[in-house]
Image (cartoon, grey):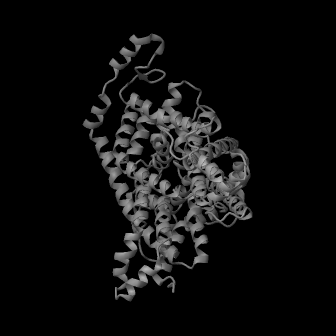
Amino acid sequence: MRKGPSWFNITALALGLAFLYVPIAILVIYSFNASRLVTVWGGWSMRWYIALMHDAAMLDAAWVTLRIGLLSAAAATMLGTLAALALTRFGRFRGRILFGGMIYAPLVMPEVITGLSLLLLFVAVDVDRGFWTITVAHTTLTMCFVAIIVQARLTDFDRSLEEAAMDLGCPPLKTFLTVTLPLIAPAIASGFVLAFTLSLDDLILASFTTGPGATTLPIRIYSEVRLGVKPEINAVCTILIAVVAAGIVIASLMTKLSGGRGQPVGTEA
Amino acid sequence: MKGGAVGEQATGGNQASWPRRLIVLVPYLWLAAFFLLPFVIVFKLSLSEMVRAQPPYVPVLDLAEGFEGLKAFFAALSPRNYALIASDSIYLASYLKSLEVASIATALLLLIGFPLAYGMARAPRRLQPFLFMAVVLPFWTAFLIRIYAWINILQRDGLLNQALQALGIVDTRPVWLATNTAVYIGLVYSYLPFMVLPIYATLEKMDETLLEAAADLGCPPWKAFWLVTLPVSLKGVIAGVLLCFIPMVGEFVIPDLLGGSENLMIGQTLWTEFFGNGDWPVASAVAVVLLCLLVVPMMIYQHMQARAIERGS
């Protein structure tokens, strides 16, 4: 018989989860603080959100960030899915070890190195830096996360379904579209959401590869935060958290609806 | 006949048709162009010299000059920046500090992460997906925001000091921000999911009957933990340690926002060289040395991941 969790287990869980969530909860609560002093509670208010609506620079940064996020997540999802297929369905091909290395290395590579090297590439080929260079940088990093999530799903499910379809004379492309794709769709959706949130969040790659006129939200938040805590920043952060949370809820609902039992999120790394 | 068809599919990797080749080539070329090639450029630049010009370094490879240009290009490269890094104690101190901070933070993460993962694995089965989700969620919410949340709490008249004073633990408010303690709090907070999840993955698959067998044979629980649970979870522990340690050595945002201004970590030194001093060649040399430091743990990590794929497919 399976023994239940001990007191030690329960305490560890409770403390661990509290450690993870209390700081975020405090941030969200204080974004509704009426007081200008960030450490004194002055009652509930929406004033910082209203102030945000009139902050043109912040709105501009949000718009840039959103566009980069959607574009790079779409590109990363396509590239990452192809990479996952190459890793799991193609057996051994020339350069497979290097390929696997290039998929896994960016996940642990310190971002200052990736950012610096990408910038030097963009300078060497002499392209105008800004919106597009940030998008390429984010695509490169996040496609690896997508590849790992999709690859985990591809190795997870029953290969015999694909084989059965092909035995019955279904051509490879049609097999992929009618059998494989629906099965890995939840993982692809999770991959897209993760790629989007990572892009939304990235400071270092964006700082290195940005150019005139392309200030993303993290770059803007970072320059404000260096000068100290501001209630407006609490409000921006709360909105970002809400956007990300909504994305995750949608992704996990999609996983449920499509009947996928795989892990809905990409942490197999 | 059917068997033949399956066999053909199984060996399909060799008789690469064009669409199949494209599936490999497109992501392959993308990563080669935007991940691999840039490192070659960093290495080249680390052997260059800074100038006040655009681009701010010499030599620049001019292919129009032909072979003579190529010769001049290679003649102008020099290991001067590496000599600078070796001779100036700021860099050495910076590397050592990074390794020290990353090691201590990894140890702290293991101390906190292992009991958490163990608690998750021992929780009732139906609760486990929710617990899994609960640990993963913070990983999805912006990294920068989570560090910012701690500035809120740790500042001089912040909530931590207010709470400590209200409880009568301290009289005068201690300084938390701009200290090593704050950096450790930030690192542990940000990387906790990366430590917990691989350990949880191994513990969750552990065969509980092993522990029962140990108990039946008269093994006390602590000894069973030491002899059974720990060895079983070793693979997860190693994965977690590598996933945390490697990126933490090059961490920039956390020490920059939570740490003090003396004794910079190497990520900060690189950032200052690049953005502050505009010395791209020295920043590149700093990056190359950092990469050399991390190459061994990265190879171990790659090797583990490659084996995991082999098992899966």
- Say left or right for A148 vs B212: right
Left or right side of B28 for B44: left
Q: In this view, does B227 lie to the left or right of A149?
A: left
Q: Is residue B155 visible?
A: no
Quadrant assignment, res A67: top right
Taking depth in this image into account, of A26 and B145 the one nearest to the observer is: B145
Residue B234 placed where, x, y %?
A: 39, 66
Residue B173 in which image quadrant? bottom left
Q: In the rendered view, would you say A25 is above or below B64? A: below
Residue A99 image point, x, y percent: 50, 42
Closer to the camera, A115 or A254? A254
Residue drawn at x 48%, y 60% is B194
* Image position, residue A12 (x, y; %): 47, 75
**With respect to residue A88, does B41 lie above or below?**
above
In terms of depth relative to the viewer, which is nearer, A70 or A265? A265
Q: Please tell me in which quadrant of the rendered image residue B219 appears.
A: bottom left
Specify whether residue B272 is in view.
Answer: yes
